[in-house]
Amino acid sequence: MSDKRTEIGEIGEFGLIDRLHEKIKVRHADTLKGIGDDAAVLDAGDKVKVVTTDLLLEGVHFDLSYAPLHHLGFKAVAVNISDIAAMNAIPKQITVSIALSNRFAVEAVEALYAGINAAAEHYNIDVVGGDTTSSRSGLVISITAIGEVEKGKEVYRSGAKENDIVCVTGDLGGALMGLQVLEREKEVFMANPNMQPQLEKYTLVTGRQLKPDARMDIIHELRELGVVPTAMLDVSDGLASELFHICKQSKVGVTIYEDKLPIDKQTYDTAVEFNIDPITCVLNGGEDYELVFTIDQNDFSKLEKHPDVHFIGHITKAESGKFMVTKSETAVELKAQGWVHFPEGGKSS
Ligand code: ADP
Ligand code: MG
């Protein structure tokens, strides 16, 4: 190691992964895709296996003062299943590793597992192992998920081509607004513990934050309709950031239209209440765990009437850049804000 010290905030999370990736060698021919997509892809005969892992830390990714353990268990599974879905694969198994401080009683761990088991039932997967250890910094949960898909039907970030249509499922920005509401109510409660949190108005957005659902329903429907997206990711860091990944890996550009972006009324109203631009919320809010994918124009008619798939734009040549056409018909350049996990000198989000 040289003496040079580079702050992680200088290169960011993606910059760091890129830098580590450069020094990692692939040694086996059955490693079809290593680092760089929503999941790794491994050759398994007429199928491929996909593998993904996610780490959730108390105080960084969740706050137990408002996240019930049951929901947290469900969410920890769902965020992994979302990455399996993003490969167009069907999840089969998970392993669950936890680190616990002595703050946690057996009953608390059982409540966490009730959520994990509920998710296992919901996504039809088996919990096949894991690891348990102690922690000095609260609760840590790491889940690895394994899925499979017929070879050739797996979908990478790199397959989008010019004129493909950009699709988004569900609606976006809800999870970010849910977080804002939960953080605000927590502050109010800390200042005055006699105040009861006012959450009834916000159940949709807080639900999106606390208990997201991976869009496996969409993956099953795409199969039934005979549609294989050309590229796909799940929205974990924010739509703009995910579109940047598609553009970088597919070597294309993109144009999306502000008036096509899906936002729920409650998300919109909450954003306005918090003085946040609803469109910023849709473009940069993370953790929605919806799917963003591109399809060939020939597949449009198969999806056209789908009530929960929105067509937000199209893929262009790389030289055309990345733009959003606003409601007033001006093209503004897209910025990949995303979640900043390592802000310079700041608190991790
Ligand atoms: P996602 O948001 O879909 O979970 P990430 O942005 O976390 O994806 O990761 C992007 C890619 O980098 C994935 O292929 C992931 O497996 C890989 N990756 C992330 N962190 C590391 C690490 N510390 N070492 C090796 N690979 C990593
Ligand atoms: Mg992902």
Image (cartoon, rainbow, N blue to C red):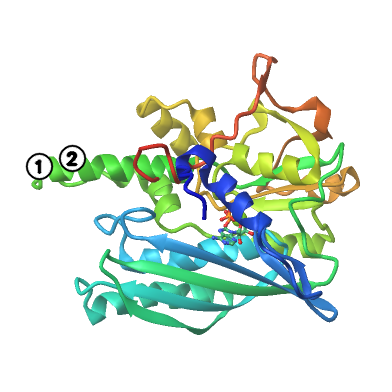
Return the mark for residue 32.
none
Residue lying at 80% horizontally and 37% vertically, measured from the top left: 252
The x and y percentages for residue 214 are 57, 60
The answer to whether mark 1 and mark 2 are in CB contact below 8 A is yes
Residue type, numbered disc 2: Val
Q: Quadrant of residue 310?
A: top right
Residue toward you, 314 or 269:
314
Residue sitting nearer the eye, 4 or 291: 4
In percent of the image, x 49 and y 68: which residue is there? 77
The percent position of residue 231, horizontal first and vertical second, equals: 77, 51
Residue 168 against residue 67 in the figure, above or below: above
Please state if 231 lies on the left or on the right of 180 as rendered.
Answer: right
Q: CA distance from mark 1 to mark 2?
A: 6 Å
Which quarter of the rendered picture does the C terminus lie within? Answer: top left
- Position above or below: 231 against 225: above
Query: Is residue 52 at all visible to an observer of this figure?
Result: yes
Residue 188 badge: 2
Outermost residue to the front: 3
Q: Outermost residue toward the right?
A: 298
Amino acid type indicated by mark 1: Asn
Q: Quadrant of ligand 2?
A: bottom right
Residue 193 appears left or right of 206: left
Badge 2 element: helix
Left-right relation of 198 to 343:
left
Q: Residue at x 58, y 66 (%)?
A: 81
| Quarter occupied by residue 327 | top right
What residue is at 74 percent from the left and 51 percent from the top?
Answer: 157
| x and y percentages locating residue 69 in the rendered image | 32, 67
* Residue ID for mark 1: 192
